[in-house]
Image (cartoon, rainbow, N blue to C red):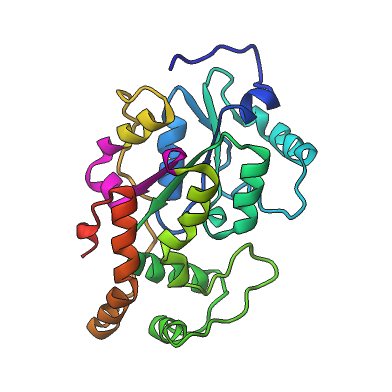
Amino acid sequence: MTAATYAGTPTVESVIDRFVVVIGAQRCGSTLLHRMLDAHPEISMVKPARPEPKIFLDAELTAADLRRRISERLTSLDPAADLFGEKSTSYIESPLAADNIRRLVPDARIVAIVRNPIDRAVSNHRFSVANGLESDPLEVALERELEGWIPERLDDVSVSPFAYLGRGCYVDHLARYEELFGHDRLSVLMLEELIDRPESIATLYRRLGAAESFRPPGMGTVNAAVGKMPQLSSRMRSRLADYFRSGNAELAERYSLDILRWN
């Protein structure tokens, strides 16, 4: 793909016609992925990456609403790009967002990034604690979910901050996007792959139709949490491995992922 040239700010129409949506998952390196996509001269992502735009999360979102929201972000986009996109990690588990994207941007390219779901759960708990949402210790919170109970979702957050395990059942969440957009329009990456083999971003560039020869600066550099991450007991880690086993296997088969590194 050759970067198109526009004078000044891109139009809403040009953005909608060539849209990439990074749907998550949370605590899986989506900010790193946003940076690697935005670094490509043919791709321009809505900025800032944080706080996230969450353009498609509202019920009864209309085409006029979408145009207004995108127009508010146009100045953050590079008019010379061929592809435009946004990243909001709540999308992966939101049927509403999936339906809105399909209804309003039917030709969108969908990208998800996943991570060892046990590590994701630990990171999610730490994030919830740091933001004053969670008061229970890590293994107490995980145990209650294993027993089938989690606190009710809070009104001022877009998804449950307490579904530490459920949010890591990636294949279940991705099924709706595959149903709506088809297997070929859905790209799934592993954070561990991007870190260990950052050149693997070339595969995504190619799938999106951008030059795969480009290498973004600072490849493999993740936004690391400050301080030491909590450690799980071997018993809890074993239980979680059993919890995720079948879903991980299906995920690997459907999207050709090397989840052996998760072991």
Q: Who's the residue at 61% across and 31% down the image?
A: 76
Q: How many tags in the picture?
A: 0
Q: Who's the residue at 69% across and 35% down the image?
A: 70
- Measured as percent of width and height from the top left, residue 123 is found at 40, 66
- Measured as percent of width and height from the top left, residue 89 is found at 52, 53
- Measured as percent of width and height from the top left, residue 258 is found at 23, 52
Q: Is residue 29 one of those drawn in magenta?
A: no
Q: Who's the residue at 39% across and 60% down the image?
A: 225
Which quarter of the image is occupied by the C terminus?
Answer: bottom left
- What is the quadrant of residue 116 in the picture? bottom left
- Measured as percent of width and height from the top left, residue 81 is found at 52, 21
Q: Is residue 43 left or right of residue 158?
A: left
Compared to residue 95, the image places residue 68 above or below, namely above
Is residue 170 or residue 230 the one in the foreground? 170
Which quarter of the image is occupied by the N terminus?
Answer: top left
Query: What is the span of residues highlighted in magenta in the rendered image?
Result: 183-200
Q: Is residue 193 one of those drawn in magenta?
A: yes
Q: Who's the residue at 38% across and 32% down the image?
A: 207
Is residue 47 or residue 55 the one in the foreground? 55
One can see residue 163 in this view: yes
Q: Is residue 84 left or right of residue 122?
A: right
Specify the principal SS of the magenta part: helix
One can see residue 228 in this view: no
Compared to residue 221, the image places residue 135 above or below, namely below
